[in-house]
Amino acid sequence: MKSPAKSFAARVRKLNQPGAAGRMTALVIPYAWLALFFLLPLLIVLKISVAESVMGIPPYEPLLRLAENATVQIHLTFSNFVLLLRDDMYVVAYLNSVKIAAISTLVSVVVGYSMAYGIVSSPLRWRYLLLMLIIIPFWTSFLIRIYAMIGFLKDNGLVNNLLMSLGVIDQPLAIMYTPLAVYIGIVYSYLPFMILPIYAALERTDPSLLEAASDLGARPWKAFLRVTLPLSMPGVVAGSLLVFIPAVGEFVIPELLGGLGSPMIGKVLWAEFFNNRDWPVASAVAVAMLALLVVPVMMFDRFASRYFRGRS
Amino acid sequence: MNGRLPWFAISVLVLGYLFLYSPIVSLIFYSFNESRLVTVWAGFSTKWYGALMHNDALLSGAWLSLQIAFLTASVAVVLGTLAAFALIRFGNFRGRTLFAGMVTAPLVMPEVITGLSLLLLFVAMEGVLGWPERGMMTIVIAHATFATAYVTVVVQSRLGQIDMSLEEAAMDLGARPFKVVRVITLPLIWPAMLAGWLLAFTLSFDDLVIATFTSGPGAKTLPMEVFSSVRMGVSPQINALATIFIVVVTSMVVIANQVAFRRRA
Amino acid sequence: MAVGAGGIQDKPWTDPKAQPFVRIQGVTKYFDDVAAVNGVDLNICRGEFFALLGASGCGKTTLLRMLAGFETPSAGKIFIDGVDMADIPPYRRPVNMMFQSYALFPHMTVGQNVAFGLQQEDVAKPEIAERVAEMLELVQIGELARRKPDQLSGGQRQRVALARALIKRPKLVLLDEPLGALDRKLREHTQFELVNIQEKLGMTFVIVTHDQEEAMTMASRVCVMNAGMVEQVGTPSEVYEYPNSRFVADFIGTANLFDGVVTSSTASETRVHSADLDGEIVVGGGGTAAVGATVSVMVRPEKIQVVPDGSPAPSFNTACGQVREIAYLGDMSVYHVELPSGKRIQLSRTNLLHTADTQISWDHTVRFEWHPANGILLVI
């Protein structure tokens, strides 16, 4: 029964579980992958954001350079960040992104909550279909849905044609290429991400709690405010983070729907990188964006590890 | 939550679904338009679908995207399932917090940052190692990295629901750890793995931003082709393409839900 | 309370030369900084039906999982049939376990579940089929072989789990709260069945339970555990009649405990003065406590008799009190009596006549007594 490789068996036992060798492999592979392709790239961004920009490929000065006396010299510069603060364009884009993301999130909460509540309160035989109609856009191409939005909002698009044929307006409303189009686009694209977690939270709520509340004399509106709403807050928080975080860094929506009047930080980063080929400044923009998102991302992370872990 | 639906709930639902679906429906409608002008109805035609079949740029983009999505989903399912095992089954190992953070953070990382950071990594690697050449491979690596996070979440929640004593019972009856995984755990989590695979495939097939950053010369994915075409203006061929896409996705979602429904019933 | 028949006649544990089948030596298990099991020494004999009894969190399940190999002891050793288990993983131990949740594989039929263990040993297919059929007959679910676990009732699931744990004819069978999920009637029925199966197959069973009645009904010996440690090991009647601590006295059945000080101690009796009682307490049997020691005297409710009105009052082990509560249980009634000292005791009487309960009612004053042999001296 005893294997000759006793020292190995002893080591395995130290890990406290059988099959330790397999477990080690199972951990090391994804760990190494994520360290190499997620963590390291972020560190490189951080590094390049404090490098000096030069012409050439790659268009930045190496941060570490072996000097002649074999000591490592570090070329640190914060000029890229100073530029971000000095130039109005960056500050405006930064603030504008936060504003657009925050307002869109708020609108999504209101619309998403109402819809999730409507789905939960509808009869069972309808619920299946209604949920499916939320899930389908969730799986449908993001780009195609934005494209559909263009056809919907533009001067001779569906909305304007409809309103003009009804005689409500006689000139097309200029919605495309305005901040309004960006708001509509974000809410439209991310609404399923808001509805699904809220729906899940509402569906889990035990109906007898509402019965108990009304038995104790709470009117329906009071019962909603004091019981349903607090119990569904985890869903609202999850949905809000799922909308706010990607909305801040959004590129496609402001690029295709927005005009020059609504710069967003994701668009600025793209332009710095692809048009100006200024990698250090693009990296500095990325770092600034990360700094903005650190708190919401960590909130999401803590939330996710509690929420997705399941009941083991 | 019972009784009749209040009127405001009904109107919210009607308005909400109108908002979600009228752009899509109008897009599908105009894909059958005879006229080149997308918004003026000039009679029924399927000619844009025919034109699509001869659009080499879109076709080769679609082929590239399919290959990338297939590879991405396959890599992500392996990595994501392993990561889910580590998070659910390995207890409190050293470095767990960092690992859990790295697994979930890509879920919410803005695409521009993921794209930029990976490109900078690939450039640096190319400078030092002479590898990888940017193109299909680098897109697959980039996509697999963020798709792994989604697969992990899906598999993790299924794995968390499985009673650990099932695996212990199998081991108690003489099955070695590897066999336990093969005959007990995998059969129980494969629906989640399949869902994860489909999710990863869709995310990869759909991605524009990360692919644009990490792609090299000559590798233009379908979303990249569509994006440059849309920038030029609305085109009925894109409507036709979008319609095909929506029909495929819708029927897959419906089938998947029917299967899941029947399994549960 | 019935006493299980399993191997009780031989009492192998009383033979000093016998080699114990399972030896647990100084086993301790820490989870983080908490000792779930703390320095446990136990010997279990071949063919025993051994029960680990205790409240939840007392370490009994952890001990069982260490026998199965799912937990590794932080210190100490476990031998099964003379072999040190330290390096042996669960899948190579001659041990099978029946899980509290049953842990039936949901994607396999009943037959596949039961056959699983044999398939791991490369047993020939015809033999597997034969043994599975035989085993399903033994647990009386032969007709359910093709069902899936979610198509079974709780009692049927329990039988599948048992069959699966027995099919490999393990030397040692571990049962973690095997009857916990069954309703009362089915549980009582199954208890006897389990004992019969164990005797028929001649295997050694170790069962974990928090239900003292279950442990007493089935086990040849009971090990009472508390806070990770063994409080007492003995036959069901030993732990009930002769508990060795206040904890065991209180945990097994109901105990009336009178605290006091030893006033005299001879070879035949010990006398105790207790403020709880207005008389003296006399405990028969050899004195184990020195004069002046603080002790508790434990008396079971059924061993206390009511002195009929008009009879002469005894001179010791007696008191008067007022009846405060009556629990009528059908076969017997339990009376809570408050003594003048404020102490409450319980005494029980079998309801021999239809009208038995009419003689004692609320707020009646009753006098009671007990025989010196029925008191147990517990040194605090």
Image (cartoon, coloured by chain):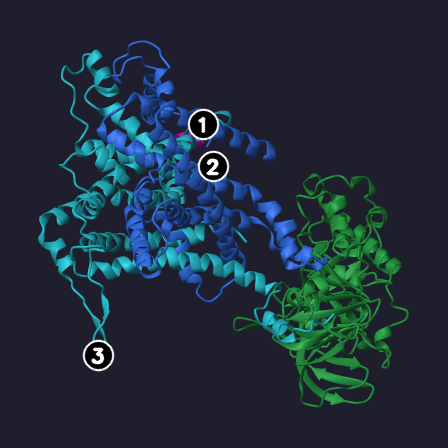
Q: Is residue C73 visible?
A: no
* SS for callout 3: loop
Residue farthest toward the top in the current orientation of the protein? B43
Give coordinates of residue B93: x percent, y percent.
49, 65
Task: Work out which quarter of the rendered image holds the C terminus of chain B and state it.
Answer: top right
Give coordinates of residue A129: x percent, y percent.
47, 26
What amino acid type is highlighted by mark number 1? Val
Give coordinates of residue C19: x percent, y percent.
83, 77
Host chain of mark 3: A
Q: Residues within 10 Å of mark 2 (few under 14, many from 20)?
A: some
Q: In the shown orientation, is residue C249 left or right of residue C136?
A: left
* Residue for badge 3: A69
Q: In the shown orientation, is residue B117 left or right of residue C139?
A: left
Host chain of mark 1: B
* Residue for badge 1: B248
- Marks 2/1 in contact by CB < 8 Å: the verdict is no
Sequence order check, earlier mark of 3 and 2: 3
B63 over A16 or under it: above or below: above
* Residue for badge 2: A211
